Image: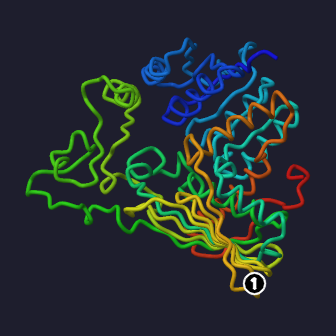
Amino acid sequence: MARIRIGIIGAGGRGVHSFARSFSKDHADETEVVALADPNLVRAQAGIEWLGIKADIHDNAEDLVKRKDIDAVVVTSPDYLHGEHAALAFKHKKHVFVDKPLATTVEDCLNAIEASKRARKVLFMGFNLRHHCVVRRLKELVSKGTFGDIFSVQAIEHYNGGRTYHSRWNRLKKYSGGLWIHKGSHDFDVINYLMGNVRPARVSCFAGVFTFKPERLPFKPRRGVEPGPTCNKCVYNRECPDAFMFREDGSSAVYKMFGDEAAAVDGYHKNLCMYLSDKDTHDQGIAIVEYENGATASHSEYFATPISNRYYWIEGTRGHGEGHLHDRWVKVYPRWSHDVIHHEIHPEAGGHGGADPGLFQTFVDSIKRRKRPTASGVDGTWSVAVAVAAEKSRAEKRVVEISELLDPRSKVLQ
């Protein structure tokens, strides 16, 4: 069978350094990246040069998706455009891979699903955690009944991510929907995945900016000498422990894609001071979910921390389970026993703890071999529904019913 010809919407780090690199290099026997779309042509051209491939560049998504020589589209544009770009690709009869989240509103998620059904094309959700070896093992154990009926799942992420989420575009809800959507959608999906067929019913959330505020700068500014606005321009960058610098000699791929020349096009800087940047999302918080059957779950995320790890705890009628993603182990504590069953899991190569290669290969298989996607548009919608409810709960200081956002019995979700 001929190679799948792929177009990528979004010339950011994920679109170029992850998706485009993998589909043009690691899976080159089955896939070929033929076009990249981004309104910033300087950034897109730098991305193509870094990849070392021949591919066309478009300054808009529509010109890319309407090409007859493209079979599949990967959507890695800013989150608020995901639903629009997915629907546009389906309109032109393309298979679509959407990096998480599916959209920033439930309505856009449902529209994308309906568009995929009309086009009769694959809608593949980019939930790479489902491919992580620890999550896979936990799901296997849950499916075998090791824990019995699940009545609670807890997820915690520690991620030293201030410079990732408070210095860049995703710090603003108008682009990302908020970090419960942009980041938390991963973990809400894992929780839903482990819970099985039962659906979330209501959400309560508490979150805010505790650390990344001007008064918590990790150095003392001198009178009359203002810090910021970017780490490269900041006069305190040698004394700030959080400074994130780009090489300014123009030789690095990151600098070419996100340096001064690219920033002159759209004003986007990747290393704004995370303490001074305008932001309306959180740097720490907890979301609590109740499911239809009375089971409960929680997800906490912390972006001002020196460690990076994801942890999952499962409580069931037959036992307790623990999973550590970075340490790659799972422990099972059977009920009515003093035994502890320890699963050491061999590390896998590739991005996101070895999850990305499996994610990409499954997308290829879903098109070439009609293999069912690991995560569908329906899975993406339920994750976004929980995340949107968390953002709404935080803003309105109340419990939010999932039924306010969607009809769980909708035919679109079947």
**Residue depicted at 71% across the width and 59% down the height:** 137
The image quadrant of residue 247 is top left
Question: Residue 100: where, in percent of width, then height?
Answer: 64, 46
Question: Residue 133: where, in percent of width, then height?
Answer: 65, 53
Question: Residue 119: where, in percent of width, then height?
Answer: 85, 30
Left or right: 177, with 269 as reference point? right
The amino acid at mark 1 is Arg
The image quadrant of residue 325 is bottom right
Nearest the camera: 413 or 299?
A: 299
Question: Residue 32: where, in percent of width, then height?
Answer: 66, 19
Q: How crowded is mark 1: few (under 14 residues within 10 Å), some or many (20 or more)?
A: some
In this rendering, the answer to whether 216 lies above or below 252 is below
| Quadrant housing the N terminus | top right
Left or right: 138, with 230 as reference point? right
**Residue depicted at 53% across the width and 25% down the height:** 38
Left or right: 139, with 354 as reference point? right
**Residue depicted at 21% across the width and 53% down the height:** 240
Find disc 1 in the rendering and name its residue: 335
Which type of secondary structure does the marked residue at label 1 adopt?
loop
Nearest the camera: 271 or 391?
A: 271
**Residue depicted at 80% across the width and 50% down the height:** 378
